[in-house]
Image (cartoon, rainbow, N blue to C red):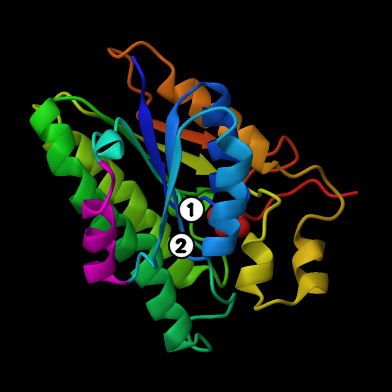
Amino acid sequence: MKKVALITGATSGIGKATARAFATQKFDLILCGRRQDALNELKTELSKLVSVTTLCFDIRDKTEVFKQIESLPKEFRNVDILVNNAGNAHGLNSIQAGNTDDWDAMIDINVKGLLYVSKAIIPGMVERKSGHIINIGSTAGKEVYPNGNVYCASKFAVDAINQAMRIDLNKAGIRVGAVNPGLTKTDFSKVRFKGDEERAEKVYEGFQPLLPEDIADIITFVVSRPYHVNIADLTVMPTAQASSTIINKD
Ligand code: 8X3
């Protein structure tokens, strides 16, 4: 049977790679993001393989999240797979030097935005007693590292929400699991360092980081297990990474 997948943060990085991987699995796609032009571009590419619709909104905007998801055309309303991917880091400063706007952005996007989207999708899954939620966490949600403070806190929250969803949705028969990537070469560090490409590049120098396609491949594996198999929590790092602070660089 045809499956419908909704991916947040679908216009770049892990979200975009996951959209491409899901299209090869013949999942119909709801691509969510903040840039309509980038959404349109990906829609044009993937429409050759599957049915695609786009929703352009900022997951920080609670009203907009519900409005957009409620506006889905009938054939996309029954979401089988929700990939809570949208999230980012802003700044890498000590707690005493942290910028409160950065803190707001990380909590609003990584935690509250994830909750709003989930809240809009979960009732349908509960009604149908079927669905799969993949929460994209991070190694930063398993281990706090220097200057990671609020970003780590937001990803620890994702870890807690992932566990909580699994408990609360247990009776509804819904699969819930997290994929927690370590260092992955996306725009993540460019966003964290506010467009400073040189500094961002340095994060991934001297070793082979994960690529978004590596994570997309794993997400595809997770969602394609038989329905009685729920991969609850999966952490993946580059071979060169042993922890958030131990990286084998040339
Ligand atoms: C991305 C991994 O180590 O840059 O969430 O925080 S890390």
- The residue under the point 15% across, 38% down is 124
Residue 56, quarter of the rendered image: bottom left
Which badge, 1 or 2, is on the more N-terminal residue? Answer: 1
- The residue under the point 60% across, 31% down is 48
Of residues 105 and 142, which is closer to you in this image?
A: 105
The amino acid type of the residue labelled 1 equals: Glu
Q: Position of residue 242 (x, y in %)?
A: 66, 42
- The residue under the point 78% across, 55% down is 204
Of residues 21 and 137, which is closer to you in this image?
A: 21
Q: Is residue 36 left or right of residue 17?
A: left
Q: Position of residue 80 (x, y in %)?
A: 30, 30
Instruction: Tell me where the magenta segment starts and ends, as one range.
Output: 61-73
Q: Position of residue 123 (x, y in %)?
A: 12, 42
**Quadrant in which the N terminus is drawn:** top left
Q: Residues within 10 Å of mark 1 (few under 14, many from 20)?
A: some
- The residue under the point 45% across, 33% down is 51
Judging by the rendered image, the residue that carries numbered circle 2 is 152
Q: Position of residue 96 (x, y in %)?
A: 49, 88
Does residue 27 appear in this view?
yes
Q: Is residue 87 left or right of residue 93?
A: left
Mark seen at residue 17: none
Q: Confirm or reject: label 2 Cβ below 8 Å from ligand 1.
A: yes
Please name which of the two marks, 1 or 2, marks the residue nearer to the observer: 2
Judging by the rendered image, the residue that carries numbered circle 1 is 143
* SS for dot 1: loop
Q: CB atoms at circles 1 and 2 under 8 Å apart?
A: yes
